[in-house]
Amino acid sequence: MTLPTGASRIVFIFAHPAGHVGAPRHYTPYFAAQDLDWHMVPMDVAPKHLAETIRTLAKSSSTAGFNLTMPHKPAAFELCDEVGPAAKFEGVVNTIRIEADGRLVGESFDGGGFLNAAREAGVFDPHRRTVVIGAGGAGRAICHALAAAGLKRLRILNEVPGPVEALAAKLRAQFPDLDLCLAQRFDDAGLCVNATSLGLHATDALPMDPKELPEDCAVFDIIAARRTEFMQACAARGLRVVDGVAMIRHQLPLQTAFWRAGL
């Protein structure tokens, strides 16, 4: 393992709490494989300190960029001077680069990473119903990516009605041919996506009962920190399961190219 030096560049990943963050074990080796002397460093930043932390670290030439995870994606969007098309639709960013003039440019790559991973795993079928559980930052990104990729039928479920109704309205406006519903059912699902934080801890409830899924349904759980009880229960039923590591792996080239564009 190559340790960072004073000449290294740092990509910070901000979370709160940050104890579950295992992204550096994927990002830092990827940077090395691209001949980049970059290292990812996790940092626990409380929401009230996010703005000052980003603005301070952005002033250092050692900082290559920022990666945002829960709960910072919506707040990071508001800090950016400019955002890309996916972020503009979703209202969140998970990646920020620093321009030469100090401006902060943000984009959301959760959706692109998810979609590329789902395609590689062979679980994206535009003609089957996809059920996405969660309308937070990751859920919005995933739903947007699915609709933009030509998905015909989408169901979105969320514990709180407000966010899911707002997301549904935006999707209907941009994708009028999308068959979109919010009713809680799983019997017609070809793919079920857990886009919530449920599963980060062993004591978490399951996002849904795997017994409700059809026998030919695939499952994509975006949790990357651990193999969740939901993943295990779905695998025990014989369902095909894709985890959040695949999503990270497919975000890596997208995010790295974005950060490098600011150099």
Image (tube, helix red, strand yellow):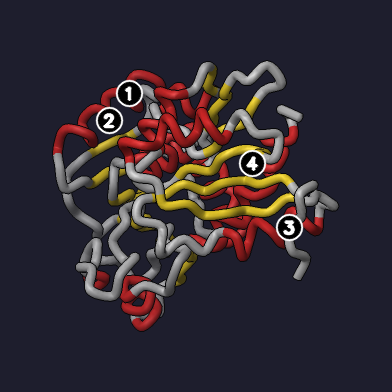
Sequence-first disc among 3 and 4: 3
Q: Amino acid at mark 2?
A: Ala
Callout 1, which amino acid? Lys
Q: Position of residue 163 (x, y in %)?
A: 22, 34
Q: Does 29 appear above or below 81?
A: below
| Label 4 neighbour load within 10 Å: few <14, some 14-19, many 20+ | many
Classify residue 161 as left or right of residue 137: left
- The residue that label 3 is drawn on is 4
Q: Residue at x 32, y 23 (%)?
A: 170
Q: Amino acid at mark 4?
A: Gln
* Label drawn at residue 168: 2
Disc number lying in front (1 or 3): 3
As helix, strand or loop, the secondary structure at mark 1 comes to helix
Estimate the x, y position of residue 110 in percent, counting from the top left: 50, 43
Q: Is residue 127 visible?
A: no
Which residue does the image show at 35% across and 27% down from the upper left?
171
Q: Where does label 1 land, which residue? A: 170
Nearest the eye: 255 or 168: 255
Q: Disc 3 residue type? A: Pro
| Residue at image mark 4 | 255
Cα distance in 3D space between marks 4 and 1: 25 Å
Which of label 4 and label 1 is nearer to you? Answer: 4
Q: Residue furthest front?
A: 6
Q: Are marks 3 and 4 in contact (CB under 8 Å)?
A: no
Of the two numbered discs 4 and 2 in the rendering, the one whose residue sits closer to the viewer: 4
Q: CA–CA distance between discs 1 and 2?
A: 5 Å
Whichever of callouts 4 and 1 sits on the residue coming sooner in the sequence is 1
